[in-house]
Structure formats: C-alpha cells, structure tokens
Amino acid sequence: MHEASVTEALVKLALEEALSRDALRVTAIGLVVGETTGYMGESLEFYFRNFSKGTILEGASLNIAYVKPKIKCPNCSLVFERKKFTFECPACGTPGEMTGIGNEFYIDTMDIETGER
C-alpha cells in the first residue's frame, strides 16, 4: 500500500508541471521505476487512476519503464545484475555491493496537449 502516497505525490508533481506549461490535458506519463523500490505497476496504475480523477491527468496512460538493480564488485569494479540467491561477482567471485541503480522513481516524460483556454 506504500504505492498510494508516492502516486499521490506523483500526481501532484505532474499536475504542477503540466499547468506550468499551460496544458489542457495530459495524455501520457513516462515513469521510471527501480525494481528495488518494490512498487508494483498494477498498484501505481490503480492509485493513479483514482488520484487523477477530475484533473487534466484523468485518462492519461502511465507508461512504466523498470530499471533492474546493479551491483558493483569492490575487487574488480565490474557492475553486474544479481543472479538468484547470490551477490557474487561473475568475474572474480567476490561478493558485490549494491549501487544506487535500481532505486529510481521519477517522471521521465509527459505528453501534453496545449491550446487556447
């Protein structure tokens, strides 16, 4: 249920940006979500539909691009994706360390319609 608060903040931010650009309507929002956030697409879309009702965001599609988490080896500096049940570097076997890649959550794009008000 933690998707509710982040989606509410997302709608507020998108509305502010769209209105600052004199948008009449937003037709699509491109969202980047890191997999380690745990945010589920279905929940984000459900809350987006509810929080956007009655606004210029209502009916906009939410296009989510997921980012896989990356791990960096402290020994050989290889950046890699984790395999199930292990954090070992595929090159040297040293346990890797999490990077910030995979923690993203931001609006990447917005398709807006503008015109005379």
Image (cartoon, rainbow, N blue to C red):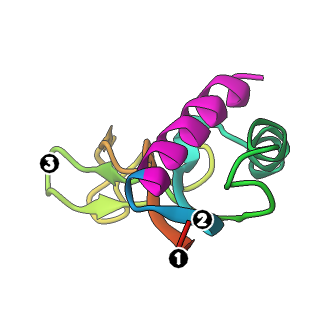
Residue where numbered disc 2 is placed: 24
Label 3 with label 2: CB-CB less than 8 Å: no
Q: Residues within 10 Å of mark 3 (few under 14, many from 20)?
A: few
What is the secondary structure assignment of the residue under circle 3?
loop
Q: Which residues are magenta?
A: 1-19
Q: Give how far across and how far down residue 20 sits, in percent.
A: 38, 52
What is the secondary structure assignment of the residue under circle 2?
strand
Q: Is residue 12 magenta?
A: yes
Q: Is residue 35 magenta?
A: no
Q: Give how far across and how far down residue 114 sits, in percent.
A: 52, 74
> Which amino acid is tagged 1?
Gly
Reading the chain from its start, which is encountered first: label 3 or label 2? 2
> Which amino acid is tagged 2?
Leu
Reading the chain from its start, which is encountered first: label 1 or label 2? 2
Q: Residues within 10 Å of mark 2 (few under 14, many from 20)?
A: some
How far apart are the alpha carbons under marks 1 and 2? 7 Å
Relative horizontal placement of residue 51, taking residue 64 as reference (left or right): right
> Which amino acid is tagged 3?
Asn
Which circle marks residue 75 in the picture? 3
In front: 108, or 28? 28
In front: 26, or 68? 26
Examine the rendering and report whether any part of residue 108 can be seen.
Answer: yes
